[in-house]
Amino acid sequence: MRMTSIDPAKLRHFVAVLDAGTFALAAQRLGISQPAISKSIRATEERLGVPLFERGRAGARPTDQARLLAAHARGILAEYALADAELHALGKADAGALAIGASLSLAQSLLPDAIAAFRRRWPDVALAIDVGLSEPLFARLLEGELDFVISAPEPGFPIDARIDRTFLLEEQDALVVGADHPLLAKAEIALGDLLAFPWIVPRRSARIDRIHAVFAAGDLPPPARMLRAEASELARGLLMTAPFICLIGASVLGFEIETGRLATLPDLGFGSTRPAYLARRRGARLRLPARNLATLLTDAAKGARP
């Protein structure tokens, strides 16, 4: 099979058919007609001199040559996407603008002092900060919409190969309750004691699996009453008004814990650490404002490490 020059659009059509399993579904996903995508695949086959799909009632079954081409095609398309993101990032704003993403915990712990220092030194730089979950932030990073992201994804979170990471610090999870929670009056807290109270857990999080695993290791069922919510503001309010238990990044509620409005329970096997890091597109050179803020953030992280 000769990898002569192939139109990237035709490679996208090829990968779409490969992933969809049929020409009709691939055409639907791409928003083009089935004859158009069939013509594109035939042109690619003629260009390469090999068959790529066996057509039949069961759909489009890839040949051995198609499987070989697939890895190269995906790599080529990934490079095109990265180049497009880089060009978009360069053209989206002038050197005096900066857009970053941050997880909630780091937005509350590292960002305030770093931004204050940044504003004192570079007051004219337009700064936009998006606070949210790691998955959408990393997607926007790869699309070139963000200069960099600071986040502490949970264990098992897949990191795209197009992302480079710089370690900042370790984030710690903790069991958090209200300052007047009944468990705080006990001289010693056992794992089973936690089952008498409702829990707040995120809807999409590895913490749910960890909660189940800890109780299973103690031959206990998981909590019967779980309120699933993503908003830390809701967790903060519920913990202060009702006997909930929440497994959450300690820094998210750090101010309330430090001022005594909330408290932490003994670890009991639930606590864990995960690395927080500054993520950027691999091979991308940060513009001057981004480099300046990144330096302030890494310095702040060094100061926050134990």
Image: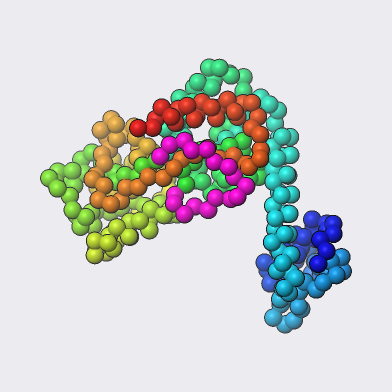
Image-quadrant location for residue 44: bottom right
Q: Residue 282 falls in which quadrant of the image?
A: top right
| Residue 247 against residue 24 in the figure, above or below | above
x and y percent of residue 108 in the render?
43, 33
Q: Nearer the viewer, residue 67 or 214?
A: 67
Return the residue found at the far bottom.
57
Q: Is residue 169 above or below residue 23?
A: above
Does the rendering let one see residue 31? no
Q: Residue at the location (53% across, 27% down)? A: 295
Q: Position of residue 156 (x, y in %)?
A: 47, 54
Residue 253 place in picture, x, y as percent: 35, 37
User: Which residue is depicted at the point 41% across and 54% down?
Assistant: 206
Is 51 situated above or below 97?
A: below
Residue toward you, 99 or 10: 10
Range of residues picked out in magenta: 154-170
Residue drawn at x 72%, y 67% is 68
Q: How is the image coloured?
A: rainbow
Task: Check the picture and name the quadrant holding the N terminus.
Answer: bottom right
Q: Is residue 207 in the magenta section?
A: no
Residue drawn 36% across and 42% down?
172
Q: Is residue 81 among the parts visible in the rendering?
A: yes
